Structure formats: C-alpha cells, structure tokens
Amino acid sequence: DTAVSQTPKYLVTQMGNDKSIKCEQNLGHDTMYWYKQDSKKFLKIMFSYNNKELIINETVPNRFSPKSPDKAHLNLHINSLELGDSAVYFCASSQGSRGAGEQYFGPGTRLTVT
Amino acid sequence: GENVEQHPSTLSVQEGDSAVIKCTYSDSASNYFPWYKQELGKGPQLIIDIRSNVGEKKDQRIAVTLNKTAKHFSLHITETQPEDSAVYFCAASMAFGNEKLTFGTGTRLTIIP
C-alpha cells in the first residue's frame, strides 16, 4: 500500500531525448509536487498542482512540462534532455491547498543523461 | 523569496551522544518549519515539525526549538543510535500560503558505534 509511487526508479537516456516520469498518490491528497535533488543533495521545488491546477511554477526551463490528469496523478515530461538534467526527481503530495502540512515524498527517480 | 541556511553540512557523533542541527531563515512571514530525514536511496520523510505559535516540540528522542525573533530553529536528537544516520533537511514555508517549502542544504549525520 505505497502512499506515493513513482515510475521508473531509474532512467538512463541520451541527450536530446524526451522522457516522462509518472507519479501517483493514493492518500487522497489535493496537492502534488515535483522536486529536483542535485548531486549535492540540494532539494528544490519545481512545480505544484492543486486539484489539477498549477499553483507553483518555479524558474524551470520550459522543456519541463508537468501534467495532472487527475488529482491523484502528476506526471513530468522532459523534452530535449540535457546533461544538466541529471538528478533525482521526487514527487510529493500533501493534504489541502492553503495550509502547510506534511508532504509525503515518493522514492525518487534517478535520471542520468549521457 | 525565502532563504534557509543549514549547519553543519556534516556531523559525526558517538552513539549515545546528542546531535544538534541548526537552521536560519530569512522571511519573517514563514511560520511552518518541518524537519525531514532522508535515508540512502529513499525520499525525505517528515520526522517533526513546528509552527510559529510554539517555541519547542518534542517527540521521544527528537526535539525542535524555534526562535522567531532571531529567525532560527534547531533539531536536537538525544541518545543517538546507528539508525539515526541519514541526511537531515530543515525547511520553512508560510502555513497559509502556497505551501512552497524552501529546504536547507542538508546535514549528513553519521553515528559512530
């Protein structure tokens, strides 16, 4: 009964390719997030969706496009992959749209661009 | 925007001793301060959080203190055990804003048996 799941766990691809990472949460939460963790372990938010509506969009290249088909899913599509996109990407979810609460993180997707 | 600084970046303590990790934040509007533990190969997991209306919170061996005037908060782990070894992150956000968590840079805690 995984709370926040991501697929794939590992993704190795070449520069210029397009790839997607999928995220699903079964917690009934309203808000979902994508974070990027670089090689120095620094965690930075990329996007946040509340009930399929984009509410946070940090300064992320427009090669990154999140898609939320419903409030339990938030996918991340990346076009024209670059070496600098190599990182671990975490999906997270939380309850509510206007009230900080615990964010539950998925296990991460390690993306390696060669 | 919010900026969170975290120290130290690495910390080694003998098993049974206490560990303290400190964070400072810049935005006085922040009022929610969680701490996350990240074990190798896993996602961060919330271990304790504090809101600005309290100065201290405890949960068994872990405690968090908050000084809103000085804009700093700390994590205290007592009677450390080998399973406490992990990377710890502090974070800050506005509890009734857009829930954007700004994370510190992380502290790699190693417990020496």
Image: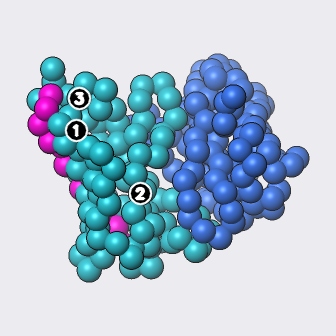
Residue B6 at least partly seen:
no
Whether pointer 3 and pointer 2 mark residues with C-beta atoms closer than 8 Å, the reply is: no
Write the residue at 23% across / 29% down: B81
* Callout 2 touching callout 1 (CB < 8 Å): no
Mark 2: amino acid: Asp
Residues under labels 1 and 3: Cα distance? 17 Å
Q: Is residue B17 magenta?
A: yes
| x and y, in percent, of residue B110 in the image | 23, 30
How far from the left and from the top, in percent, is residue A106? 61, 36
Residue in front for this viewpoint, A59 or B110:
B110
Q: Residues within 10 Å of mark 3 (few under 14, many from 20)?
A: some
Q: Which residues are magenta?
A: B15-26
On the picture, is B93 further left or further right than B84?
right
The crowd level at tag 1 (other Cα within 10 Å; few <14, some 14-19, many 20+) is few
Describe the element under mark 3 as helix, strand or loop. Answer: loop
| Callout 1 amino acid | Thr
Residue A40 in view here = yes
State the residue position of label 2. B49
Residue found 41% across the figure and 30% down from its top: B39
Q: Which chain is blue?
A: A
